[in-house]
Image: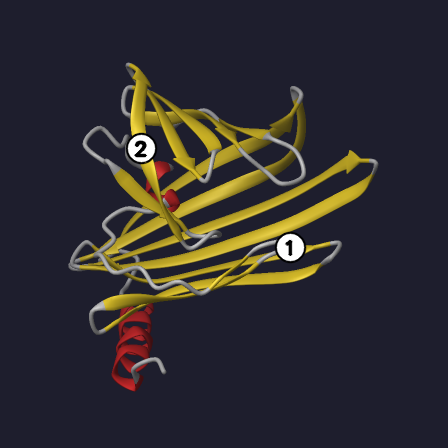
Amino acid sequence: MRSLFLLTTILLLGFNFYGYSQNDTINDVRNFDIKVAGVIVGEMKATKKHEDTITHYTINSKVKFWFFVTVAIEHTAEVLYYNDKLIYSKSTSVTNNGTYLSTIIWNKDKYDVEVNTYDYVNKRSINKVIKHNVATLYFEEPKAVKELLLDSFGEMATVTTTKVGTYLVEVSGKKNYFEYKDGKLVLANVHSKFKNYNVVARAYDD
């Protein structure tokens, strides 16, 4: 059973975080197009908010494309780090086939994992501290990162460099590539149970 203290801490951190003024909080927003076979089928917005010891990531995406039937997916991820340690991750996907939820929560000395997706269930705990997850890839080039959390699977994935600025993130044979220029993500090729797709960065302001 999850620690009541942990859940209370998450709520308190959340309320304190959202209580900060815009002037006190460092915000970073990245916008992306989602493409299948070169055609834009959706969009993604990634937001990072940081104040003192708390970092909060939000990823929102919507896609709609034809794959024998019309496939529509809305995905939201909420991730909270405290002192650079992931303490809470929640991923929600609303699809034609239903709504699927994944949560990873730090509990005393491990992460409680509850993953229920279209064709995958995972309740195996993670017994190591997580410093990086998929959300961080949209804001930071993973030069020194060896593994990270794939939130929707509740599993750790290895990170390797294939060439300068390009990284392979792989778990259970599923390969995802992330390409960076000047330290910023410009293109990601992402594995999907429906159809692989590209996440392409829109123009950066700086």
- Which residue extends farthest bottom? 4
**Crowd around label 2: few <14 · some 14–19 · many ≥20 (10 Å):** many
Amino acid type, residue under disc 2 in the picture: Val
| Residue 206 seen in the current view | no
Which residue carries the number 2 mark? 159
| Location of residue 93 in the rendering, given as x and y in whole percent from the top left corner | 60, 56
Quarter of image, res 139: top left
Kindly indicate whether the residue at mark 2 contacts the one at mark 1 (C-beta within 8 angstroms). Answer: no
Helix, strand or loop status at disc 2: strand
Q: Farthest residue to the right: give it.
A: 69
Identified at 25% across, 83% down, the residue is 5
Residue 152 appears in view: yes
Q: Nearer the viewer, residue 143 or 42?
A: 143
User: Mark 1 falls on what kind of element?
Assistant: loop
Q: Earlier in the sequence, mark 1 or mark 2?
A: 1
In this rendering, the answer to whether 81 lies above or below 205 is below
- Distance between mark 1 and mark 2 Cα atoms: 25 Å
Q: Residue type at mark 1: give it.
A: Tyr
Task: Kindly indicate the quadrant of the structure image that contains residue 3.
Answer: bottom left
Give percent across and percent down for residue 196: 60, 31
- In which quadrant of the rendered view does residue 40 lie? top right
Against 45, residue 204 (above or below) is above
**Horizontal side, residue 64 vs residue 149: left or right:** right
| Residue 74 percent across, percent down from the top left | 63, 51
Kindly identify the residue that appears in the image at 53 percent across and 40 percent down. 44
- Compared to residue 140, the image places residue 153 above or below, namely below
What residue is disc 1 on? 118
Q: Is 40 on the left or on the right of 69, as rendered?
A: left
Residue under the image location 34 percent in, 80 percent down: 2
